[in-house]
Amino acid sequence: MVSPLASHDVLRTIIERDGAGQSATTYALTEASAKVLLRREAQVFSDALLYGAAAEVGVDRLAQYRSAAELMVPGITDQLSCDRLQGSLAVLQLSGQDPLACLEDAAHARPIGDARDRAAVVEWRLTLGAAGPLPWLSGPPRL
């Protein structure tokens, strides 16, 4: 039998989960900080780059990437970052590189071991080439 929590237990749980209180002004200032805005914009840029490249190469080519990745690293297509990996392979193709050779190099460079997201590990190992707007971001391929 499950007994309901007392009201003070519920209140304690809410306070503990919430952590330190934060005023609306502090929240607004934090959300408007350059660090937070840059992180968001960098993620949007990166996602747009990969999405655009994937759209450009088409679903048939993406399916080829997916099949090849699954053969090289069994179970990789079930990982959370598989779509991101496919987008990175599309960027490589549009940059004039052989995406499947790059995939093989990245997949077999070092053991992946028991990584939680093997697709993320392989994608991180890829070198996308063109310099982006920030040192840690890749730029669009030169078409």
Image: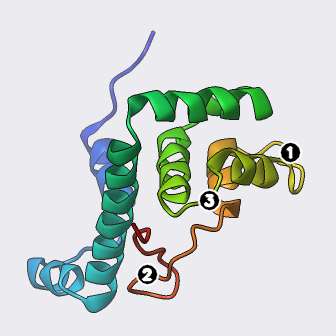
Disc 2 residue type (three-letter): Gly
Disc 1 residue type (three-letter): Gly
Q: Name the residue under label 3.
A: 97
In the structure shown, which secondary structural element does the residue marked by tag 2 occupy? loop
Q: Split into 4 quadrants, where in the image is the N terminus?
A: top left
CB atoms of marks 1 and 3 within 8 Å = no
Position of 84 compared to 48: left or right? right
N-term-proximal mark, 3 vs 2: 3
- Name the foreground residue: 140 vs 123: 140
Q: In this view, does 102 lie above or below 119?
A: below
Q: Name the residue under label 1.
A: 113
Q: Split into 4 quadrants, where in the image is the C terminus?
A: bottom left
Return the x and y of residue 33 as percentages of the image width and height: 24, 88
**Residue 126 can be seen in this image:** yes
Q: Name the residue under label 2.
A: 132
- Rendered image: mark on residue 125: none
Q: How far apart are marks 1 and 2 (CA)?
A: 31 Å
Residue appearing at x 53%, y 53% in the figure: 93
Position of 66 compared to 60: left or right? right
> Mark 2 packing: few (<14 Cα in 10 Å), some, or many (20+)?
some
Residue appearing at x 22%, y 77% in the figure: 22
Q: Distance between the residues labelled 3 and 2?
A: 17 Å
- Name the foreground residue: 9 vs 96: 96
In the structure shown, which secondary structural element does the residue marked by tag 1 occupy? loop
